[in-house]
Image (cartoon, helix red, strand yellow):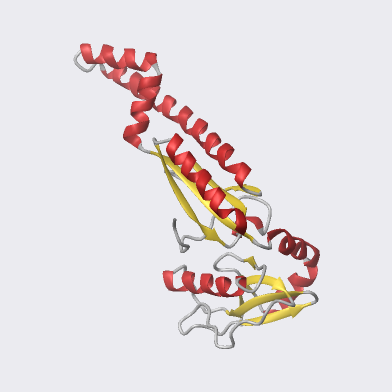
Amino acid sequence: MSTYVYGIAASSHPALPEDMGGVGDPARPVRVLKEGGLAAIVSDAPEGLRPKRKDLLAHQNVLSEAGAGGAVLPMRFGSVAPDDAAVTGVLAERAEHYQERLLALDGRVEYNIKASHNEEAVLHRVMSQNPDLRAAAEANRQAGGGSYDQRLQLGEMVAAAVQGLEAEDAAQVQQVLEPAAEAVSAGPESTGWLANVSFLVDHGAADSFLAAVEEVRKSHPHLDVRVNGPLPPYSFVEPGPSEPAEAESHV
């Protein structure tokens, strides 16, 4: 039977409720595997597991319950090992890394920020800021819409201006929010978002971080800014970009 892994904690972590259920239908009982100074929160892995909302929420609920008792390194939904021995083997092999991460992430949460342009507002902005664009648009208007090549050229000019503003705004979003966080992890690029960044924030600094997000919204009214969190610090368990699960709460 393969083993589903929810997270990793210290072996001294408080016990979870005995009747706690995890993923699967029926829910698989959650249990703890200990190895040295570490513990893995696991259950049996159901066959054919898919990221359905019920199981995403079950994964999150286990992490929330465990996280209430102290630091937990959250694993991504769908983290499955061949068996219990494989899990304890990894705990032994990577003990130093996991213990360092538990210390670094204790009392911290993750906020994922995604930003996109309000299309109408950003078109108004690039036109107002670019006299060449305004001149080309006016020339086309006076020419009854302009030729095909003229319309194509104008479209390419607008697209280039929007792309430049996207890069500028993405940098500014991170620049404004980074001082309110302890660490930053850039997520993978995805269609529709000009910024997809996760921030590691101390519990006690959460209000200050969210206030900084509101400042971004006020100073950049042409942006739609989405906040996902507070989350377990998924993006900071390992180095490199990652994407928080979509089942979390939204602010």
User: Residue at left 68%, top 75%?
Assistant: 40
Q: Quadrant of residue 158?
A: top left
Q: Is residue 227 left or right of residue 93?
A: left
**Residue 234 can be seen in this image:** yes
Q: Position of residue 233 (x, y in %)?
A: 61, 59
The number of numbered badges drawn on the structure is 0
Coordinates of residue 177 in the picture (x, y in percent): 57, 42
130 in relation to 118, above or below: above
Towards the viewer: 167 or 176: 176
Residue at image position (65%, 68%) is 72
Residue lying at the far left in this picture: please name it: 144
The quadrant of the image that shows the N terminus is bottom right
Residue 225 sits in which quadrant? top left
Task: Out of 83 and 72, give the one closest to the viewer.
Answer: 72
Q: Is residue 189 something that shows in the picture?
A: no
Relative horizontal placement of residue 78, taking residue 25 as reference (left or right): right
The vertical placement of 241 against 131, above or below, is below
Q: Looking at this view, is 15 or 34 the one in front?
A: 15
Residue 138: x and y in percent read: 27, 14
Q: Residue furthest bottom?
A: 18
Q: Position of residue 172 (x, y in %)?
A: 54, 34
Name the image quarter holding the C terminus: bottom left
Q: On the picture, is 209 further left or further right than 147?
A: right
